[in-house]
Structure formats: structure tokens, C-alpha cells
Amino acid sequence: MTFAHSIYTILVVILFSSCSRYPVSGHIDMVNSQKKPVIYLIDPVNFGSLLSSFEGKVIDSTTIDQKGNFQFTKMPASSEKKLYVITIQKHGEKYPTKLENDVPDSSNYIPFVFQAQENIKINSVANQLTKNASIESKIIDNQSIIKLIQNRSLLYDEYKAKSKIASEDQLLDAEKAKLEFQKSLMESVQNDKSVFVTALALRWISPNGDYERLPELVKSACLNLTQNAPDHLWTQQICAKSASLSLTPGDQFPDFPMPMKNLDTISLHSLLADKLTLIDLWASWCAPCHQENRNILVPLWDKYHQNGFQIIGYALDSSDKGWNNAISKDGADRWLHASHLQGDVSPLFDLLKISTIPANYLVNKEGIVLAKNLHGVELTAWVDNYMKK
């Protein structure tokens, strides 16, 4: 063996050893940052803890040197792919697992997928760690994660532009803009087969884990993952979450005994119209509900009641007087009304697994849910189209 060849061999060994010793490394620009020069490596453990503050398990930490470089030496040796999160914290923050989710562009973490024998390089800017993240990796999941991060930032900006509220009357418009953001983000990953990418998207549409208004999106994710990763623990956890949520189109609305305004108790299915029934969940103290009653429901009732359209209102009220006054004032005495008059304590809401209003369900004469939570002109257009059939 020649001297030159020996030197070359030594250099290759050194390079390989360096890569093996630092399977995850990178660079963080700390200029003008209020963050501590320390990076924590977090194992989310399960779907429920993914991207949730103060959860997950810290498995390593390392300092960011004066040039902005960092390396991790403690990576699990599993040959299976697994998602991890790196995060940095502000000076004075004592919890290494605090994750900032309020504004995507200023989030303080980067999710990535790792498996043994791989080398990954992660770069970003401290003040906008998630938004400016780049991941150099042969693992395809990481390319999809970066694409998802970019889509999330763009879609969130669009959502915030639409949801600037000038008055209380526009609360439903803000809710609609939020739902559009959530649906669009999930649509951006619907063809991705990675359980990690789908899980990240699900967590980003509702960082606090509240999917009450999003059961269709969780159900769709469950179906996709059941096809692409049926044995993965997160698939099982996401599907369990889906099963715990409220009705989706195609489900049958329960034949609940309704405590009617006239004090009778009548099974809901016996109240359904021949063609279409709107089950409206509201309260006398709900300002958007009043707007909906006066501007949308009254015109729909007047237009279609004689053609097989019914409205059944159920109120989260505690005062009989306040409830009746609101019904009369809104002109809602045209249609049927029920309430347990127990305020937020509602057996019907418990059965439906919901807690927020305004909410509604459109059902056919068999009680099958056709659509839900449509409001304003969107509700009017849907009913117009259906009643023409």
C-alpha cells in the first residue's frame, strides 16, 4: 500500500467516524436572537404528545457554538423510522419542552424523521426556527415535512388575512376562514403516505388537540393511514381519536327524546320533515346565533317549509324567560324548539360529543346526516340546491 493511499484511507475513516458520531447536526443563525444557545432533542412518544408543550421526553441536549453549529451524539439505534423534535428556548424559560404554537412563523421547534445509519443536517434561524427550517436527508419523509412547513406558513397567512374581525357579526366568517385553513392543510398531505407527515398536519390544524369541529378531517386521516401504515402505533391512536368525535355526513343522527318548548318530550325522528330538517344548536346568549336566526333561518323557513323543510332548535339555556324572549325577538317562533334548560349541562350535547355553538346538522327524513356546520350564505346555497332536487 502506498503512502498516498494510506493517507486517503485514514481520511475516509475519519470522515466516516465523524458522520457516525454526529448523526444529527446543523447550523442555527443566532443573530439578534433572544434564545439560549442550547438545543433540546425531544421524543414525542405518542401522537397525543406530538408538538404539545411540556410533553414528550428530552433524550439529549447540546450547545450551539459561537459559529451557530451543533451536533447530537445520542440518537436511538432503531432501524425503524421515528419522528423527533428539536427545540430552543428563550432565556429564562425553565422548561425545555415548551413549544410555541400560537404563530407558525415564530414557532421554536423543528420536527424531523430519523433512523439508524442515517446522517441528517438541519439548518434554520433562531427567531423563526420552524419557518426557516431546511433538512438535508435521504429520508423522503423529511422532504415532505419541509414542504408541509412551507404550506402551513402560506395558508396561515391567508387565514389571518381573512379572519381580521371588525365586529362581533363577523365571528362566523372568522370561523369559516379558520376551517378553510385547516381543510387546505390536510388536503396538502392527503396523497402523502407518511404517517409522520399526516400526524404533523393533524396537530398543526389544532395544536391544542381539539378536533370537535374537525371530525371529517380526522376520519379521513384515519382511513388513509389504515391503508398506508395500518400497524403503526400513531395510526391506531389517530383512529381512536376519530372514533371519539362527533357525527360526520353519512352517520345517523340519534333519535333523542327532545324536551320541547310546550313541555312535551318527543323523539327527534318523529319531528323530522318529509325532505330536509335543520337541527340548529344555539343559545339566547349567542350573538352569532341571533344573526343566523334573523338573516338566514327565517327566510329559509318561509321559503321552504311548505315544501318539506323543518327546523328544530335546541338551546343551551338555563332561563325559560330568556330563551322564550330570544325566540320571539328573532322571529324564530315559526319552528320547533327544545331545551333541557340546564345551561351548559346538556344530555344531547354529551351524546353528540360537542360543546360549542353555533352548530347545526342537516338531515334527511331517515335522520341521516347530509351536511353539518354550514352557516350564512353557504347554508342558504346548500338548502336552495337540495330543495330543488
Image (tube, rainbow, N blue to C red):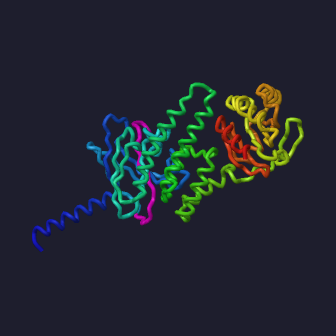
The answer to whether residue 248 is above or below residue 290 is: below
Q: Residue 107: x and y, percent?
A: 44, 41
Q: Is residue 78 magenta?
A: yes
Q: Which residue is painted at 58% across and 41% down in the image?
A: 179
The answer to whether residue 331 is above or below residue 142 is: above
Quadrant in the rendering for residue 7: bottom left
Task: Tell me the chief SS of the magenta region.
Answer: loop
Q: Residue 366: x and y, percent?
A: 79, 52
Q: Which residue is painted at 50% across and 33% down in the image?
A: 161
User: Seen in the image, is 388 located left or right of residue 86?
Assistant: right
Q: Is residue 280 magenta?
A: no
User: Seen in the image, is 108 located left or right of residue 235?
Assistant: left
Residue 357 seen from this side:
no
**Figure quadrant of the N terminus:** bottom left
User: Seen in the image, is 371 located left or right of residue 74?
Assistant: right
Magenta-highlighted residues:
77-94
Q: Nearer the viewer, residue 355 or 293?
A: 293
Q: Nearer the viewer, residue 29 or 381?
A: 381
Quadrant in the rendering for residue 226: bottom right
Q: Nearer the viewer, residue 61 or 365?
A: 365
The answer to whether residue 207 is above or below residue 300 is: below
